[in-house]
Image (cartoon, rainbow, N blue to C red):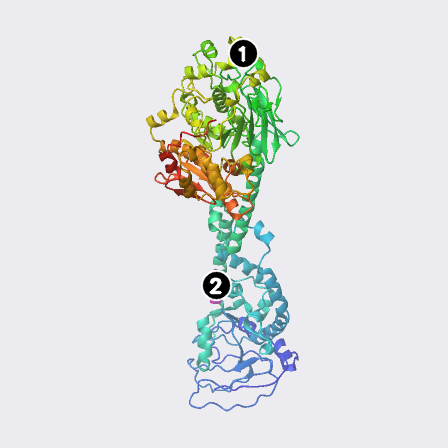
Amino acid sequence: MGELEEKETPPTETTAAQQEALEEPKETDKMLDKKEDCKEKTPSPQSSKPASPNAGKKSSPVPEKKNGDDEPEKSKPGNGEEIIDIPAENVTKPEGSDEKKISKEEREVKPKKIPIGGLKLPGFFMKNKPKAEGDGAEGELLEKEEEKDKEANGDAATVSGKDEQKSRPGLGERLRSFFARKPSAEKEKKQLVNGDADAKSEATAEATPADEASDPPPKRGLLNAIKLPIANMIPKKKSSDDVELGLGKAGLASMETLDDSLKDQDTVDRAPVKTNGTDELKGELKDEKLAAEEKLAAEEEEQNRPISLLTRLRGYKCSVDDALIVFGILLFVLLLAVIGYVLTHETLTSPPLREGRYIMAVTSCGPVEGVKEDGAFAFRGIPYAKPPVEGLRWKPAELIDDINMCWNDTLQTHNSSVVCTQRLGNGTTVGDEDCLYLDVVTPHVRYNNPLPVVVLIGAESLAGPSPGILRPSARYSRSHDVIFVRPNFRLGLFGFLALDALTKEAHPPTSGNYALTDIIAVLNWIKLNIANFGGDPKSVTLLGHRAGATLVTLLVNSQKVKGLYTRAWASSGSAILPGKPLSESSKLNQQLMATLECGDVQCLREASTERLWAATPDTWLHFPVDLPQPQEANASGSRHEWLVLDGDVVFEHPSDTWKRGQSADKPLLVIGASAHEAHTEKLRELHTNWTRDEVRAYLENSQIGAMGLTDEVLEQYNASSYASLVAIISDIRTVCPLLTIARQQPTVPFYVVTQGEGPDQLATVDADVQAILGRYEPHTVEQRRFVSAMQQLFYYYVSHGTVQSFVQNRRVINVGQDAQPQEDYLHCNYWISKDIVPRYARVD
């Protein structure tokens, strides 16, 4: 076994022996010089070890291990190196040679720790393979590596810090290289080898400084663990320093060889160097270099070959961060596109605004200009028919078909038009005969995505006033995406007068119901022009209130409106529909000509508006709305009715049409009323506090008392307040008569508003329409829920044609704070059984 030395020599000091070892010629050079002279000479069995830094120091003897111990004792110098002896067992000793003590040159310096991935050593260090003899450059190489290790470890923290900063590129760099061509893993490794091979020192890969225990080196990343073995495998151009230090013949020690060398250090063979080993090593390195160069050239050619975009995308490895960046960019672009579409869509499909508030639409008679109101556009005062004056008085309405009656410039329709002449409740007369105009309120003026149309037909009576509360709401037009159309139509004598003289001059012979022809003209105008206002002519809903509801109920049974409307909604109309023939109605109206002292139609047309209203009998203008009186029992056949069976618009009584008609899948008509629609301030003020006695006394003075039904009615309604009295009147005059009409049509829903307001909690006649148009002012939670339920019923019907809460076996919808279907309405069967309903129903 060999001997070991242990000396504490600081790594920074250079001894005289080291200088001599550095100045001595290298054993490799000696071997090259003597190759030709000593070609057949057998090498010495023991190769000289490289000079140790401690070569000049005196070594202390170490006793040999007995019985072939596995490992010799190790000395650990202060510089962190281990000095071991490797005997050569399998080498045949030449005869006559004596076993000598291992010289200082034969000592091998081995690093304390081996880096992961491989170790680059001078020459080949393999088990059972002879080692080259006499290479004195190894000691010099280790000394140079120690110096480089110190420099490398001194900058380790700086380099690791920079690597951490450079390990992750910034967002801008990643975005710029998003679609850049990415090299494969092998190309990346080779690029790393080419960029880092010259900068890597051999000491960094083989040894660590002496103070490693106190200051552990930074952990190597996965990339460095891959890079270092590959860098050692590829040959690089030999520099002058490498040739001098004997690194030109360096190879790669495999992990298996290193592990075996550590385990079996005492069994490592030491073989003499063959004379031809140098030539074989050079040839192998040359071949490897040529193969590597050819491979690199092929890869460069492959890299320079053009690659399609699809191939690049397929080869691109997208990380989670890259995916999030791309997703964010796409989301941002989509948001910009949506904003741009919203901002430009209405501009592209709508005419431009003038001065930010005026907008133009086109009609069959010329362009009209509307004004912006509450987010919607209002066109007020658009003429839809020829003025019914002079020769057109008491004639059916005619659409404007004469170009001379149209306008050349844009018609300014900013202000409301004058209403038709009518009689107010206080007896005054307002309006004009030239009144056939209409108002249009639309949220959009465009030609795509047409909106449903709601035609508002309102009047408290057929003599006026009109339109009452049924006025379009710009805010609800915008919020519910509907178009409101409110037309004017003729009232009183000008809208319903039926006379023989007028019948004889008409063709076909007819008279009366001129107001119905006005509404039919409105529907024809809507069919021609509403698309220019953003409306859908195939979705038209008629909304009638009070006397307007009576007209709507009559119109839906006329053949004249077939194809001009889609559905209808009638609120608090009259159940008394025309049943008298034209001839009978004309005879009853003959007294008007006697009052005017006119014998022909020409005289009637020349009469002024005021004179005609003055000649109208009061019985034609006022109808009883209180409890039935005894005198009404015998006067029902002689009472005046504005509507007649004219033989043109109305051929028969609607009940006959309903009996003959077939059930439809969707209801064409919805009928409704309010539970306290008979409320008037005059009746309320009769008593400050209505008690059961006051209610009993009031019933005794009516037809109910005359029929001896007072106690029964008080018990039925538990009548002890003003609200119960109004409910009795409303059921007799409006609610129950309308229910009898609805029962004649199986598909017609019927609703009753019962949600009250005010101190008496009354559901007044206008409650449902006010809720629909957004004019109902709720003060409680129940009232807010009622408004929501009423709007849901109406606007869902407008858009879809069905009533959500309607069930045929539970046809009555009780609209309180919610819409609840029920089988029937309380008390109506009682009044029908007593022959009070529909005999005393209200007449418009």
Secondary structure of residue under mark 2: helix
Neighbor class of circle 2 (other Cα within 10 Å; few <14, some 14-19, many 20+) is few
What secondary structure is the stretch in magenta mostly built from? helix
Residue stretch in magenta: 279-287
* 59 and 210: which is toward the camera: 210
Q: Residue 293 shows which numbered tag?
A: none
Above or below 745: residue 400: above
Q: Is residue 284 magenta?
A: yes
Q: Position of residue 178 (x, y in %)?
A: 54, 50
Q: Is residue 826 visible to the viewer in this orientation of the structure?
A: no
Q: Amino acid at mark 2?
A: Gly
Q: Position of residue 774 (x, y in %)?
A: 54, 38
Q: Which residue is mark 1?
A: 604
What is the CA distance from the residue labelled 1 to the residue labelled 2? 133 Å
Secondary structure of residue under mark 1: helix
Above or below 81: residue 530: above
Q: Position of residue 204 (x, y in %)?
A: 57, 70
Q: Amino acid at mark 1?
A: Leu
